[in-house]
Amino acid sequence: MYLLSGNQDASDWVKNLKKDPHIKVRIGKRTFPGRARIVIDDREDQGARHLLAAKYYNWHPGRRLNSWAHNALPIALDLDPN
C-alpha cells in the first residue's frame, strides 16, 4: 500500500512511523501486520505517485502530476499477507 504525505516528514503520522514502523492495517474483517517505510527507490517512488494520482486526481500517463502527487513524500506499507 502507498500513502503520500503532503507535509513531507513534518507530518505527525510520518514522524510516528519513523519512530516505530510497525503497523496494523484492517481491511474488512481482517487485520494485517506490517512495516511502514519511506520510499527511496526512484522507480517505486514514481509508481506510487502515479497510482495515487490516478486514484484521487484522475491522472493518466502523458499528463503532468499535480503538485500534491509531485511534491508529497511517498510512504509504503508493506503488509504480511499471512
Image (cartoon, rainbow, N blue to C red):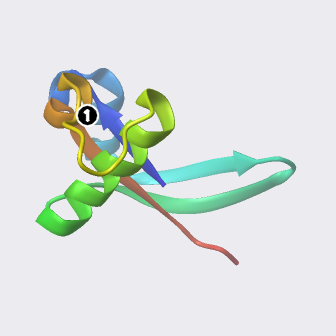
User: In the image, what residue occupies the spot 23% across and 48% down?
Assistant: 62
Is 30 left or right of 23, judged from the image as shown?
right
Q: Which residue is mark 1?
A: 69
In the rendered image, residue 57, in percent from the top left (x then y), is placed at 42, 28
Q: Looking at the rendering, in which quadrant would you find the C terminus?
A: bottom right
Between residue 6 and residue 65, name the one nearer to us.
65
Residue 41 visible in the current orientation = no
Which image quadrant for residue 18? Answer: top left
Q: Is residue 74 above or below residue 31?
A: above
Residue 63 visible in the current orientation = yes
User: In the image, what residue occupies the spot 51% across and 51% down?
Assistant: 23
Q: Is residue 12 above or below residue 58?
A: above
User: In the image, what residue occupies the spot 74% across and 49% down?
Assistant: 27
For the residue labelled by badge 1, is the local secondary structure a helix, a strand or a loop?
Answer: helix
Which image quadrant for residue 81? Answer: bottom right
In the rendered image, residue 50, in percent from the top left (x then y), is placed at 32, 49
| Mark 1 surroundings: few (<14), some (14-19) or many (≥20) residues within 10 A | many
The count of marks equals: 1
In the rendered image, residue 74, in percent from the top left (x then y), is placed at 26, 45
Residue farthest toward the front in the current orientation of the protein: 62
> In the rendered structure, which amino acid carries the disc numbered 1?
Ala
Residue farthest toward the right in the current orientation of the protein: 29
User: In the image, what residue occupies the spot 83% across and 47% down?
Assistant: 28
Is 23 left or right of 75, judged from the image as shown?
right
